[in-house]
Amino acid sequence: MAAVGVSALTYKVGMQLYTAEGPSIVRELVDSGRRVFLDLKYHDIPNTVAAAVREAAGLGVSMLTIHASGGSKMIHAAVEATRSVNPALMVLGVTVLTSMDEQDLEKVGVRGHVSDQCIAPGGFSRLPVDVRCVVASALEAF
């Protein structure tokens, strides 16, 4: 935090930082009045994701990510897990990682363009729409 200074109000805590520092870095940032975007991209069975989201909500994070490819049951479980602990927590559904292209998608059994999975009807983006949480690269938004 010292390297960024007091001007930053929101911090993104990704996998590398979270693995190195654990929940203590999140607590430190939240306790100092900062908002935390926890970018761990949860993807597992619904009960496991819900339990992880409840723990993150208890840390006081403002936003966190899940993989939309986990399906609607997992997405609903994640969103529902926030309700009793931190209803203001934003759950963001990641559609396709920005490092993936059409060839990568095809290798995992998904045909079509990356943008089709991000914003087109029938893609990953259609799964979380009912819970209002979609994340896609700006490249797919236009």
Image (cartoon, grey):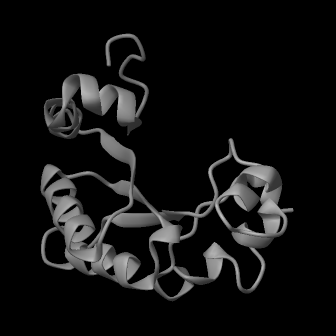
**Residue 85 seen:** yes
Q: Is residue 23 above or below residue 107?
A: above
Report x, y in % for residue 45.
29, 71
Report x, y in % for residue 133.
50, 72
**In the visual, does 56 lie left or right of 74?**
left
The residue at 33%/44% (across/down) is: 36
The residue sitting at the top extreme is 3
The residue at 25%/22% (across/down) is: 20
Residue in front for this viewpoint, 130 or 111: 111
**In the visual, does 77 lie left or right of 40?**
left
Residue in front for this viewpoint, 37 or 108: 108
Q: Is residue 70 above or below residue 3?
A: below
Number of numbered discs overlaid on the protein picture: 0
Image-quadrant location for residue 54: bottom left
Report x, y in % for residue 83.
21, 78
Quarter of the image that includes the N terminus = top left
The residue at 80%/52% (across/down) is: 103
Report x, y in % for residue 39.
41, 46
Quarter of the image that includes the C terminus = bottom right
**Residue 141 seen:** no
Image-quadrant location for residue 79: bottom left
**In the visual, does 125 lie left or right of 25?**
right
**In the visual, does 128 lie left or right of 1?**
right
Residue in front for this viewpoint, 114 or 7: 114
